[in-house]
Amino acid sequence: QLQVVESGGGLAQAGGSLRLSCTASGRTFSSYTMGWFRQAPGKDREFVATITWNGANTYADSVKGRFTISRDNAKNTVYLQMNSLKPEDTAVYYCAARGPYDQTYTYWGQGTQVTVSS
């Protein structure tokens, strides 16, 4: 079992940067695919980025070139570096973990608010 906790959200101006962190408990963190998702008010939760156990990453088109996902397995932590922020990036950001044999993300954090002002 894995528990994940996000941190690093806050308020930023358009064009600014924030870095989100997600720290997980559990000794098998390195085998999990980790993902970031977000949910804006009145909208469905959407995929942002994912990183596999060996560092392969995928991004939503809306954040490609602006956001970077990375992981430090020694620290059981995954990061989301967000640059060139836009007001439409405002959302609650969630970290999630998917086991090596799972089809879906099983473990979710509580979320961290990111607000981008214009």
Image (cartoon, helix red, strand yellow):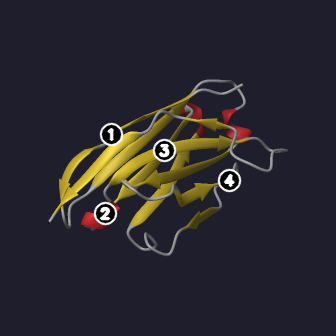
Mark 3 — residue? 94
Mark 1 — residue? 8
Percent x, y for residue 52?
A: 68, 53
Mark 4 — residue? 52
Q: Which tag is nearer the camera, tag 3 or tag 1? A: 3
Of pointers 4 and 3, the one earlier in the residue sequence: 4
Q: How crowded is mark 4: few (under 14 residues within 10 Å), some or many (20 or more)?
A: some
Which corner quadrant of the image does residue 51 belong to?
Answer: bottom right
Percent x, y for residue 46?
A: 52, 59
At horizontal 54% and vertical 59% (from top left) the residue drawn is 49
Amino acid type, mark 2: Asn
Percent x, y for residue 1?
A: 72, 25
C-alpha span from label 3 to label 1: 12 Å
Q: Does residue 85 appear in this view? A: no
Q: Is mark 3 on a helix, strand or loop?
A: strand
Amino acid type, mark 1: Gly
Q: Assess whether mark 2 and mark 1 are in contact (beta carbons under 8 angstroms).
A: no
At horizontal 72% and vertical 30% (from top left) the residue drawn is 28
Amino acid type, mark 4: Thr
